[in-house]
């Protein structure tokens, strides 16, 4: 302790250059393109910090009024720092520059950088989804854009401007469904009771020349119980689980030959107490397969018309044979129970059907049919990623039974 005292005293007295409190840099620090703190810079230009004289830049921190940090690169000689990501239009940046002189003396300077309005006729609209509310563990987050975003570099700009926060925290990633839409899901289902917030920090950010993003309203979700309904088409029964425990098993009927129900995981899209279903909606109008029915307790799982619903006309076949046109039919009492038990975002899975596999995109939320490795390949921020999936087919066909 006694031997260390002189060393401590020397540091306290500023004996070592790096122990000094930072003062004014030993040279002039400027922001290119401004000529002072009052002029506005073009957001299409880089933010460039230059050190003149004996000062060398050691670090630069630039952040805008929304808390968005600006990535940048420092030159080898320490005299120039330049941003490497697009700046936002109509934004005020606080730029903290740390320097070091030839004799090692530290310096620090704070500057202000302001950008002008974007040179674009109309901003790219950003729509976040779903609406605020409580959802099942399988609900993806969605972003829809009014302008196509095709290159990996442009997509990376968009992804970096989207912030997903959850309590508890989870691992997740974005997937580009098409040029104008991307989905976010966790590696596994959302935890029960999780709180999820999606916000866009893209307002004013340049996506490409002449294209700047507009504002978007944040989305906040609460995740309910983990409800999973598994339909075994071969056994003609559905088993429903809540948080891993079986709570009901019901006899059902699924798609007959030529109308087989799709295999795979689907997400509940909406619930409708009463839906009119016709043969014309699936192309069998005027044939022996035609029908026109009012269907109760309809829980929708694809936009092309696949539901879980009441089918009192097929009770004799439920649990024994598949006689529907692709939907999962059950008794009215069972359908009412199912209707009241599930919510948007819950998982409905079909196994052992002779039907096609559920498409990941374009016909509802088949997102969970992709492995985590494949899902990550759809992000522009994942090393070696591709360009995501094909553009989603948004056609909402009328339902079958």
Image (cartoon, rainbow, N blue to C red):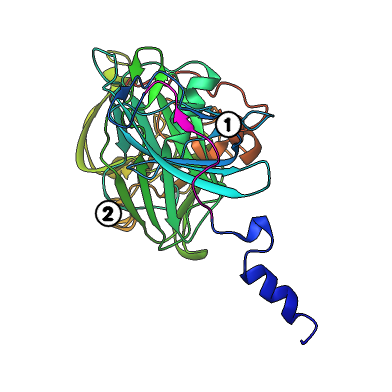
| Residue 29 shown in magenta | yes
Q: Secondary structure at mark 2?
A: helix
Task: Give the spatial CA distance, label 2 vs label 1.
Answer: 79 Å
- Tell me which label, 2 or 1, sits earlier in the chain: 1
Q: Secondary structure at mark 1?
A: loop
Left or right of residue 334: residue 14: right
How many other residues sit within 10 Å of disc 1, few (<14), some (14-19) or many (≥20)?
few
Left or right of residue 199: residue 59: right
- Magenta range is 22-34
Residue occupying the far right of the picture: 3
Q: Which residue is depicted at the point 29% across and 24% down?
A: 40
Residue 319 picture location, percent across and down: 46, 49
Q: Nearer the viewer, residue 348 or 378?
A: 378
Relative to 231, say whether 394 is above or below: above
Q: Which residue position is annotated with label 1?
A: 53
Q: Which residue position is annotated with label 2?
A: 336
Residue 197 visible in image: yes
Give residue 193's quadrant in the image.
bottom left
Relative to 57, say whether 258 is above or below: above
User: Which quadrant is the C terminus positioned in?
Assistant: top left
Q: Nearer the viewer, residue 119 or 218?
A: 119
Q: Which residue is depicted at the point 36% across and 24% down?
A: 34
Residue 176 picture location, percent across and down: 49, 27
Residue 306 visible in image: no
| Residue 53 shown in magenta | no
Q: Which residue is depicted at the point 63% across and 64% down?
A: 14
How many other residues sit within 10 Å of disc 2, few (<14), some (14-19) or many (≥20)?
some
């Amino acid at each position: 302790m006694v031997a260390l005292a002189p060393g401590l005293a020397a540091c306290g007295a500023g004996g070592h250059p790096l122990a000094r409190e930072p003062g004014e840099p030993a040279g002039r620090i400027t922001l290119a393109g401004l000529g002072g703190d009052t002029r506005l810079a073009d957001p299409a230009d880089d933010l460039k910090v230059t050190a003149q004289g004996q000062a060398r830049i050691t670090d630069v921190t630039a952040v805008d009024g929304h808390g968005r940090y600006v990535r940048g690169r420092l030159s080898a000689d320490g005299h120039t720092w330049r941003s490497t990501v697009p700046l936002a239009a109509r934004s005020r940046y606080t730029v903290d520059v740390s320097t070091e002189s030839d004799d090692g003396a530290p310096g620090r300077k704070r500057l202000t950088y302001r950008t002008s309005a974007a040179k674009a006729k109309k901003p790219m609209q950003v729509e976040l989804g779903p609406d605020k509310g409580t959802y099942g563990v399988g609900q993806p987050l969605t972003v829809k854009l009014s302008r196509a975003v095709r290159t990996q570099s442009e997509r990376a700009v968009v992804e970096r401007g989207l912030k997903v926060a959850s309590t508890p925290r989870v691992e997740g990633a974005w997937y580009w469904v098409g040029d104008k839409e991307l989905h976010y899901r966790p590696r596994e289902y959302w935890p029960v009771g999780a709180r999820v917030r999606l916000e866009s920090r893209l307002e004013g950010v340049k996506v490409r020349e002449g294209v700047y993003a507009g504002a978007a309203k944040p989305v906040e979700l609460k995740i309910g119980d983990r409800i999973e309904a598994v339909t075994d088409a071969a056994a003609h029964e559905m088993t429903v689980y809540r948080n891993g425990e079986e709570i009901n098993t019901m006899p059902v009927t699924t798609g007959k030959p030529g109308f087989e129900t799709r295999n795979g995981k689907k997400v509940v899209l909406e619930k409708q107490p009463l839906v009119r279903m016709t043969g014309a909606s699936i192309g069998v109008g005027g044939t022996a397969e035609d029908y026109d029915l009012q269907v109760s307790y309809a829980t929708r799982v694809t936009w092309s018309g696949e539901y879980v619903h009441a089918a009192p006309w097929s009770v004799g076949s439920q649990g024994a044979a598949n006689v529907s046109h692709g939907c999962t039919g059950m008794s009215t009492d069972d359908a009412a129970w199912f209707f009241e038990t599930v919510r948007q975002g819950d998982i409905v899975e079909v196994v052992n059907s002779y039907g096609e596999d559920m498409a990941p995109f374009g016909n509802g939320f088949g997102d969970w049919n992709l492995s985590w490795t494949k899902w990550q390949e759809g992000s522009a921020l994942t090393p070696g990623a591709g360009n995501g999936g094909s553009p989603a087919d948004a056609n909402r066909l009328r339902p079958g039974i």
